[in-house]
Amino acid sequence: MRSHASKHLTKQIIAVLVRSQIASALMMSTSSAETLSSEAEDVRQSFVKAGATTCARPMASTIMFLADNRPMLTNRAWKTKDANQHTIITDFVIKGTKSAYSRTGTVTLTPVSDRCVGSYTVVTTLADKDCASAMLDGGFTPPQWKIDDNLANGDGGQVRIVSLEGDHSVKFFFNDLPKGCEMTKRESLDIGPND
């Protein structure tokens, strides 16, 4: 099924990952009254119980946004002493389906004054798609997108680092694998504690 729907699936994956400009703006303006998914609420509660209260809700909102209504597994880390003054981390696996690949990643947030500053990274492996095709199918072309680097990856393929023209807070890495393409998205975050 994946080979037949490969081009459509690639477009779906990239569309979800690319919508960062609009979705990040929405995420940043989300009120504290937002209803969190059960997985996101579990993330929030674990940080609140640990004393890392400032970035607990922004972490949960970010995780919920990245999961895009799909089930996920998480692993969380924090400093045990003065947890609210240090970086909190959530590693995650967004479960795959018959029509969507699983994704892995990490969200890191650090309290800075009354803000939470950090980044997230999401990795998707497109097993039946080479990176050049994935980039073309996903619309990673000028003038909106700029290829910052195109380098040999050491195992016979290329790695292309792509940024949104005029906004270097969002980067995509397309790494050729012996079979398929590994697509990594990294985005910087700056979120208020009640966003």
Image (cartoon, rainbow, N blue to C red):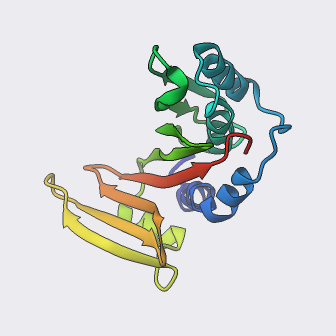
**Can you give x and y, in whole percent of width and height, for residue 10 in the image?**
54, 58
Q: Compared with residue 89, is residue 48 higher up or lower down, i.e. above or below?
A: above
**Point 36% across, 59% down: residue:** 174
**Can you give x and y, in whole percent of width and height, for residue 135 in the image?**
44, 68
Q: Nearer the viewer, residue 149 or 166?
A: 166
Which corner quadrant of the image does residue 55 belong to? top right
In the picture as drawn, the residue positioned furthest to the front comes out as 113
In the picture as drawn, the residue positioned furthest to the bottom comes out as 143
Q: Is residue 106 left or right of residue 50?
A: left
**Can you give x and y, in whole percent of width and height, for residue 28 in the image?**
70, 52
Q: Is residue 37 left or right of residue 121?
A: right
**Point 46% across, 46% down: residue:** 121
The reply to whether residue 130 is visible in this rendering is no
**Point 76% across, 53% down: residue:** 29
Please state the total of marks drawn on the protein image.
0
Which corner quadrant of the image does residue 111 belong to? top right
The reply to whether residue 44 is visible in this rendering is yes
**Point 57% across, 56% down: residue:** 17
Q: Is residue 70 left or right of residue 77?
A: right
Q: Is residue 60 left or right of residue 176?
A: right
Q: Compared with residue 8, is residue 104 higher up or lower down, i.e. above or below?
A: above
**Can you give x and y, in whole percent of width and height, for residue 120 in the image?**
49, 45
Locate the C terminus by quadrant.
Answer: top right
